[in-house]
């Protein structure tokens, strides 16, 4: 009998591969194969799966660009001491994901708290000032042509994924109190624009807003306030976990969730060729069940052009499991991503062989 539903009723000892366009939103086909799609024996050339261990960055204070194209920059930011100036990006919106640490973000709109597991969204040109209470590190995504927006909930309704109340707005009155109690005056702003920085100096503290209103403001979103969409009968595509969108890339959050319960359902991510997108995953914490030998602070890059999917051990290990226990950020980019020379020393060179085990 012919299969009528993808990711279900896969013949024993066979494997399914999804080939699709437009990042799981476009035309798609499902191929049943006798062998895993990742059964390569050797790869000679630049196009291959890559893994980088960002935890190997030794500098306590640094901003390292990792991947980039005309529409986005992906960087890793480590911060231990309070900077001497505030910052603003005239290049575009900036999304910080806090991997470690906690502290405060002072903005013109008010005070925000941050801690590990939180997104911090700073719209283009808005001044901000980090004040870490613990050594902090951030996975950073800059949108260079277009603003971050919330995903369309469609049939799920406007409260799905996360309610608008989960977006924490800055507290202006708390900022005023904090500045006064700590006798803090920030008088410099470094503005980034077209690969250059310009410093603006002032005679008085730059945080002088007395009130504001509107729907443009910096905010935080905690992973714990995101509600994963699940199906007990069939494995859902990664796009269902969308958190933020732009016209050129998508940011998803992988969080603990129950596994599919239907006896015929695939319980691990399916082998797939996302033919129009480069895929990046940053592993925050937990047990990423489709991969082996992963640790927090690692980042994978799977360029468009070849199939990828679960490791062989993951397919065996999923037996008996009822839930995932993973916290990760995924970014899919329409335009191919270039690698910064600075990350070559962080690459795990034999990662492409990990599907052979």
Image (tube, grey):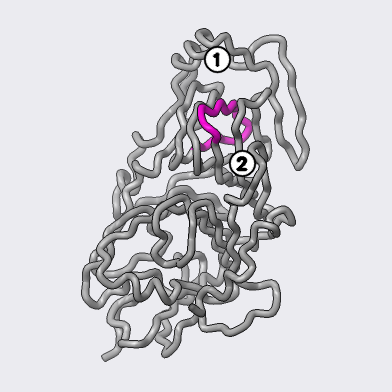
Q: Is residue 324 magenta?
A: no
Image quadrant in which you'd find residue 334: bottom right
User: Mark 2 and 1 residues: CB-CB less than 8 Å, in contact?
Assistant: no
Measured from the top left, where is residue 140 in percent x and y?
A: 58, 44
Vertical placement of residue 34 versus 201, above or below: below
Sequence-earlier tag: 2 or 1: 2
Vertical placement of residue 332 versus 26, above or below: above
List the residue tagged with mark 2.
77
Magenta stretch in the rendered image:
120-135
Question: Foreground residue, 296 or 28?
Answer: 296
Measured from the top left, where is residue 94 in percent x and y?
A: 58, 40
**Judging from the image, what secondary structure is the residue with disc 2 in?**
strand
- Count numbered badges in the picture: 2
Instruction: Write the residue at 71% across / 28% down.
Output: 190
Instruction: Write the residue at 45% across / 65% down.
Output: 25
Question: Foreground residue, 243 or 105?
Answer: 105
């Amino acid at each position: 009998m012919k299969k009528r539903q993808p990711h279900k009723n896969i013949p024993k000892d066979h494997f399914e591969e999804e080939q699709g366009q437009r990042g799981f939103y476009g035309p798609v086909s499902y191929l049943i194969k006798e062998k895993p799609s990742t059964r390569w024996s050797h790869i000679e050339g630049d196009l291959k799966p890559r893994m980088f261990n960002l935890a190997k960055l030794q500098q306590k204070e640094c901003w390292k660009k990792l991947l980039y194209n005309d529409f986005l920059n992906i960087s890793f930011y480590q911060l231990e001491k309070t900077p001497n100036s505030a910052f603003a990006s005239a290049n575009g919106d900036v999304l910080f994901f806090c991997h470690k640490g906690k502290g405060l973000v002072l903005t013109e709109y008010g005070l925000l708290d941050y801690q590990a597991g939180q997104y911090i969204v700073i719209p283009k040109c808005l001044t901000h000032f980090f004040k870490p209470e613990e050594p902090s590190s951030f996975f950073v995504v800059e949108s260079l042509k277009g603003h971050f927006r919330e995903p369309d909930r469609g049939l799920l309704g406007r409260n799905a994924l996360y309610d608008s109340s989960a977006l924490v707005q800055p507290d202006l009155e708390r900022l005023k109190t904090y500045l006064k109690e700590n006798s803090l005056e920030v008088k410099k702003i470094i503005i980034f624009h077209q690969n250059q920085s310009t410093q603006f100096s002032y005679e008085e503290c730059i945080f002088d807003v007395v009130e504001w209103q509107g729907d443009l403001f910096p905010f935080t979103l905690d992973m714990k306030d995101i509600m994963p969409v699940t199906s007990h009968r069939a494995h859902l595509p990664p796009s269902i976990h969308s958190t933020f969108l732009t016209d050129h890339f998508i940011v998803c959050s992988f969080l603990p969730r129950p596994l599919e319960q239907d006896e015929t359902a695939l319980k691990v991510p399916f082998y797939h060729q996302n033919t129009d997108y480069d895929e990046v995953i940053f592993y925050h914490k937990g047990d990423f069940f489709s991969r082996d030998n992963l640790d927090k602070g690692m980042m994978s890059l799977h360029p468009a052009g070849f199939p990828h999917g679960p490791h062989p051990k993951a397919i065996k290990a999923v037996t008996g499991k009822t839930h995932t226990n993973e916290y990760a950020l995924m970014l899919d980019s329409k335009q191919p991503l270039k690698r910064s020379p600075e990350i070559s020393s962080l690459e795990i060179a034999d990662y492409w062989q990990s599907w052979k085990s």
